[in-house]
Image (cartoon, helix red, strand yellow):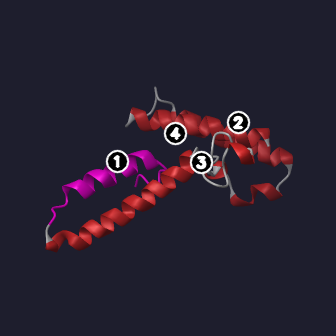
Amino acid sequence: ALLLDMDYDEAVNDFREAFNLVPEDKESLQEKRELQHKLQEAQHQQKRWNGGEKDMRFNENTGFPDGRPPERDHAKILQLPIDLEHRTKDIKCAWLKKQFKALVRQYHPDKYKGNKKRAARKFKEVKEAKEIISDS
């Protein structure tokens, strides 16, 4: 559920805790391998989501002083339609404004019923996604 919610930091923590809870006997070896594989996948997605990792392609010499840029699907965060790029500018602006208002209202930390930490994270992601999409 955390991976679907794009909360990779919490997903990695949960997989680590689950991995440490599995006993070190032969009966649990397969389960431990599966958890390790899921943990590695979550860590990979976390690195891509957060960015900042420096490697041969993304470093100071290649024009990326902060490392790899974050790979976030801003249209997915704002729940925009897939074919929005093929629409007119007025329709794009209307959709963006409508979705932004709805999601900000939904995830506002003071009004959200549930995990306030999640609400604050989602609220921040929605605001950042709107800024980036509206600049382009």
Is the residue marked by circle 4 packed among few (<14), some (14-19), or many (20+) residues within 10 Å?
A: many
Instruction: State the CA–CA distance, disc 1 to disc 4.
Output: 18 Å
**Mark 3 vs mark 4: which is more N-terminal?**
3
Side of 109 relative to 126 (left or right) = left
Name the residue at 51% across, 31% down. Answer: 108
Considering only vertical position in the picture, is 4 above or below 77? Answer: below
Question: Which residue corresponds to mark 1?
Answer: 13
Q: Left of 47 or right of it: where is 86?
A: right
The residue singled out by tag 2 in the image is 131
Tell me, yes or no, whether the highlighted magenta stretch contains residue 20: yes
Amino acid type of the residue that numbered disc 1 sits on in the rendered structure: Asn
Farthest-out residue, top: 110
* 5 is higher (above) or lower (below) than 38: above
Q: Amino acid at mark 4?
A: Lys
Tell me the element at label 3: loop
Of pointers 2 and 3, the one earlier in the residue sequence: 3
Q: Disc 3 to disc 4, how far (Cα)? A: 26 Å
Q: CA distance from mark 1 to mark 3?
A: 23 Å
Q: Which residue is mark 4?
A: 122
Q: Position of residue 133 (x, y in %)?
A: 73, 43
Q: CA distance from mark 1 to mark 2?
A: 29 Å
Give the mark nearest the N terminus, 1 or 3.
Answer: 1
Camera-side residue of 5 and 106 = 5
Q: Earlier in the sequence, mark 2 or mark 4?
A: 4
Q: Circle 4 sits in a helix, a strand or a loop, which is it?
A: helix
Which quadrant would residue 1 be assigned to in this image? bottom left
Q: Amino acid at mark 3?
A: Lys
- Single out the mark in the foreground, 2 or 3: 3
User: SS for tag 2?
Assistant: helix
